[in-house]
Amino acid sequence: MDINLNDIKKINDFKDRGNKEFNNEKNKDKLNKRAITYFQLGIKYFNDEKHKMEINDQVKKLISILYSNLSLMYLKGDEILLSLEASNKSLEFNNENSKAYYYQSVCKNYLGDYKSSMDSIDKAISISKQDEKIIQQRNRLIEIKNNKIKEDSYFENVLKNQKLDNVTFENSIEKGRHLISKRLIKRGEEIIRIAPFSISLNGKYKTKYCGICYQKKSDDNLLKCKDCDDFAICKECKPSNEPLSKYHPNDLCILYKLNSEFYKMNKVDNANKSNEKGLEDESRLYINTIYNVLKNQTNYKVLVDKSISSSATDVLNLSKKLLNYTNESQRTYSESTKKKTNILELIFKSFYGANTLKHDEISNIIRIVDCNSHGYSNVISLKKKCSSGLYPFASYANHSCIQNSNYFIDKHGVMVLYALSDIQESQAITISYIYLLNRVEKRRKELLDGHNFFCTCDQCNFQSSLTEEVCDTCKEIIPSTIGNTNLLYKEPKSLKETGFNYICPKGHTKSSIIFEIDKDKLLYPTIAEINLKCKDLRNFRKLNIFKERLMNFDSIKFLTPFQLEIEPLAKHMLNKSKPILYQELIDLIKESVECGITKSIEVSNFSIYLIFFYYDLYKYSLKEPKTQIQKLNSIRDIIIKLLTPMVYNQNKLIFDKKLNKHLIK
């Protein structure tokens, strides 16, 4: 059978049009639906006409390119499973396609299959030995492999031998080193107490909180360092006969001072002041950690029963963020890390000379801190993080978007990890690395960029299979997950069409439209008129529709992207005296959560968000002159119930001070 040149030309035309759409938005990390449509149409044409064609090497290479291009589109849109599927198909047609092996390797890496990822990149490099991206990916995997060897050795020699009451450490290929329960742990029970290796109070808190117990103290109860203005200690933590240098070494004081002087000398303008202070806070934690590693000591000065402390060896065996160049945010982080390393190397060398850590060692510590530090704000109020610290053994709690544990910092500066829901024997202990009320796409992107893995937890898998499309003709909900059989690809008839067409259960077709939305504003393209039609709350879609509806209010439509996040937005509504809208938001969060995997928000990981919202409602109601004591008591009781008895009792003085204000007017 002769080759049908017209068919080859037609498939090439689809490929070229897809490439053109990709090049129009080449530097944007998002799902390019128009490019996907043209690549899919080229593949469909081949599948429809292949019985008429001679499937020779030319045809196979062309179809392989279509699939590898499709893999790239899905990869840039964080559709990792679809990207992996497309790269696999590409290699079925041409096992010499180095790009397909590269995309396959990246996807397998994100999914935690490092051995298979290395096999793929080795095949890619055997074909394209000079490709810079392929070389960088292989170097990353070599680093991961070397880290894994080191981590496995540390697990066998140290972690495995830790004797703890409620948990033990395990090591597996899929989950790495992680914490599991040794018995049934009931909701509200303490799991483990962990002392900090290093900690840094942020901004104004560094002179208002004690640098040892990390509790807020009055000015007359604090002894402040006059040299660096970065440390204070309360009278309860420092006996009068002991020098300040025992708790705040002179070396560390000078390093803090050098750090502050650097940011004063290098500040750009007032517009960058808040960002500059954030960088200075961040640098203090780096400095504290580097200093403690250098001196092989810890910040922890107070001995408390049942708390597990750590050494420099424990810190250096933690996982670290990779210097990654796969997408724009990862490239930005990698470049930023290089700059921070240069600054901190300069600061330490200016004081210690050659007797300090090397450039690569400082870089490693920065990446360890970035990957493992825990921010802390009040248990009851989600204000700006007042401190950040490195609690090494807490880093072995894996992530889940339906976490089963949370933590608070007690009066000794110890992290107390406790159960948010019942944890069964041998079940993994999980916390959340991100904000959980974001939609699945944003959560997965944050975890990809910040922690180098694609989340496949039950919550993400559940929400990613949901829909938000509604048929314009019959108003039926349409399953719209990418890859579903009811998704058809058609040539776009205008610049506004994506080419994605959804078929509703009654056979009607709905075309997907392009919306020009700034990704930084965190608003999603479907407009509020579908508010009543979109019945599926479980993907948190309604939270974004709610935000879109608020844009009709003059006091809200000019807010910045950060102020449109759920917590700042909620606070803004109360500040503008809109308690009815605020209560609607709380109800919407509860409804969204309870119709999903979690049936009761009060005994789930989402309860921590309700605590923050109800406490803000309590503070607002306290200011209202007509608010009845009964209402305040009701809100107070809800908060205490959500906190659980253990958390409440261990923080009773703080909670009573905050939640009994209406009783002591």
Image (cartoon, rainbow, N blue to C red):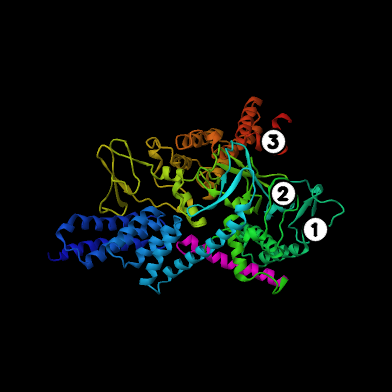
- From the image, tell me which residue sits under label 2: 214
Outermost left residue:
1
**Does the rendering let one see residue 263?**
yes
Magenta stretch: helix, strand or loop mostly: helix
Q: What element carries label 2?
A: loop
Q: Which of marks 2 and 3 is nearer the N terminus?
A: 2
Q: Residue at x 35, y 46 (%)?
A: 481
Q: In this picture, is 353 found above or below 199?
A: below
Q: What element carries label 3?
A: helix
Q: In this picture, is 529 found above or below 4?
A: above
State yes or no: residue 542 in magenta: no
Amino acid type of the residue tagged 1 in the rendering: Lys
Residue 661, percent across and down?
70, 33
Q: What element carries label 1?
A: helix
Q: Which residue range is magenta in the image?
A: 324-351
Quarter-wise, where is residue 479 in the image? top left
